[in-house]
Image (tube, grey):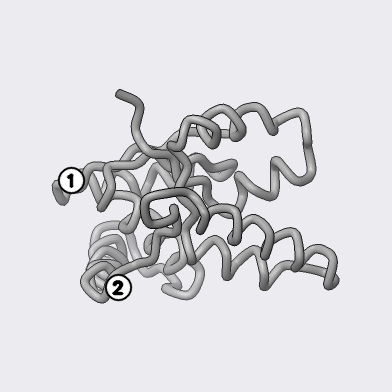
Amino acid sequence: MARPLVPDTTAFISVFRHPELWPALERPLRAGRVWLSSVVVAELLAGTRDVAEARHVDRLVSAMREIPPDGRILTPTPREWAMAGRLLARRSRLYGAVEPRNHLADVLILLSAARIGAEIQTANLRHFQAWERLARAGGLDVVVAGV
């Protein structure tokens, strides 16, 4: 059975900018495999340039909430927030200091996706694969794939 799919912010931006990529997201969406990360929603809204773009994001969120049984919005739990801090610290210890603010959102997306055994779809593959390796070494079930 195919894993649930969690597109990150770069995956949505790629689809918005290059409509020919839409089928790669549409097929799993129609199959009920796509989950929307609340972290991605925040990043998308923060990057909107006008009200029309914000409305597109709002429509996406509304559509995902309508998918039964409980919607397909994935929000990091308090435990995942704590795990994010630990994972950031571990990477710093192993590979040198990282700026948490530059990685926290991606780590939260990764950890909440791991909760459902998901595949993260991203245009930032190398970056996410580094976090995937650390997460999998810690026993988490998550896979990263390119857009």
Identify the mark at residue 127; answer none if there is no mark: none
Dot 2: few (<14), some (14–19), or many (≥20) neighbours within 10 Å? some
Identify the mark at residue 137; answer none if there is no mark: 1
74, above or below 35, in the image: below
Q: Amino acid type of disc 2?
A: Trp
In the picture, measured across the screen, residue 34 lies left or right of residue 77, that is right
Q: Report the quarter where the C terminus lies.
A: top right
**Residue extending farthest left:** 139
Identify the mark at residue 81; answer none if there is no mark: 2
Dot 1: few (<14), some (14–19), or many (≥20) neighbours within 10 Å? few
Q: Amino acid type of disc 1?
A: Ala
Corner quadrant of residue 119:
top left
> Could you tell me residue 69's position as x and y percent?
37, 51
Q: Residue at x 57, y 64 (%)?
A: 41
Local SS, label 1: helix
Mark 2 or mark 1: name the one nearer the start of the chain. Answer: 2
